[in-house]
Amino acid sequence: MSDNTYTVFLALGSNLGDKTRMLSLALEQIAVRGGKIIKTSSIYETSPWGFNHEESFYNLVTKIETTLTPSELLHQLLQIETQLGRIRNASEGYAARTIDIDILFYDNFILVENSLTTPHPHIEKRLFVLVPLNEIAPDFVHPVSQKTIQTILAECEDNGDVKRVE
């Protein structure tokens, strides 16, 4: 833990079980273990990305403030996923899951470590991340591309379904 406070954007997704409840439970645990929740997007129903599955995803983005280092925060998020029933199988690649929590941006840091890359390398390709992120932070500037989220969303070529649930 550091003495500094950092702004972090997290993407949450679920497509197994009670998806709304899973997202709610994950947000509760993030508030306890990860940092102070500042703003959270609406929930969006989206088609699976990168694999086929009959269940759609529910996705949202939340902005938090944290004093945790990137690796400490990642550790806490992985523990929350496990606590909520996430089973990771590296050989499966993209798969259905009770909960998935990704660090999109950790302040304006550009990090490439074994288990964490920030900004998340696929932000610009995924409507299911960009639409909720644009809802809460359209003017946030991507530290690598130097484009706003609003601009990145307008340029995104993903044609997946993204529908607001609430």
Image: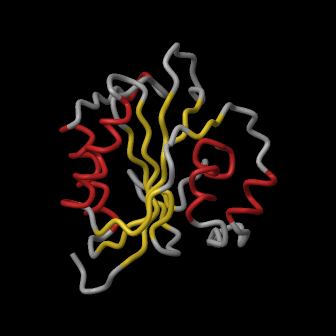
Would residue 71 be found to the left or right of residue 132 on screen?
A: left
**In front here: 27 or 156?**
27
Quadrant for residue 36, please give it.
bottom left
Quadrant for residue 127, please give it.
top right
Identify which residue is drawn at 37% across, 27% down.
97
**In front here: 135 or 67?**
135
Figure check: 99 above or below 129 = above
Render colour scheme:
secondary structure
In the image, farthest residue toward the bottom = 3
Instruction: Residue 39: give x, y in percent of width and height.
Output: 44, 65
Would residue 97 be found to the left or right of residue 155 on screen?
A: left
Instruction: Residue 65: give x, y in percent of width and height.
Output: 35, 73
In the image, farthest residue toward the top = 54
Would residue 51 be found to the left or right of residue 160 on screen?
A: left
Identify which residue is drawn at 46% across, 62% down.
9
Quadrant for residue 13, please give it.
top left
Q: How many marks?
A: 0
Identify which residue is drawn at 68% across, 52% down.
124
Instruction: Residue 15: give x, y in percent of width and height.
Output: 43, 26
Instruction: Residue 63: give x, y in percent of width and height.
Output: 44, 64
**In front here: 73 or 162?**
162
Would residue 83 be found to the left or right of residue 53 on screen?
A: left
Figure check: 99 above or below 11 = above
Figure check: 45 above or below 53 = below
Identify which residue is drawn at 47% across, 74% down.
107
The N terminus lies in quadrant: bottom left
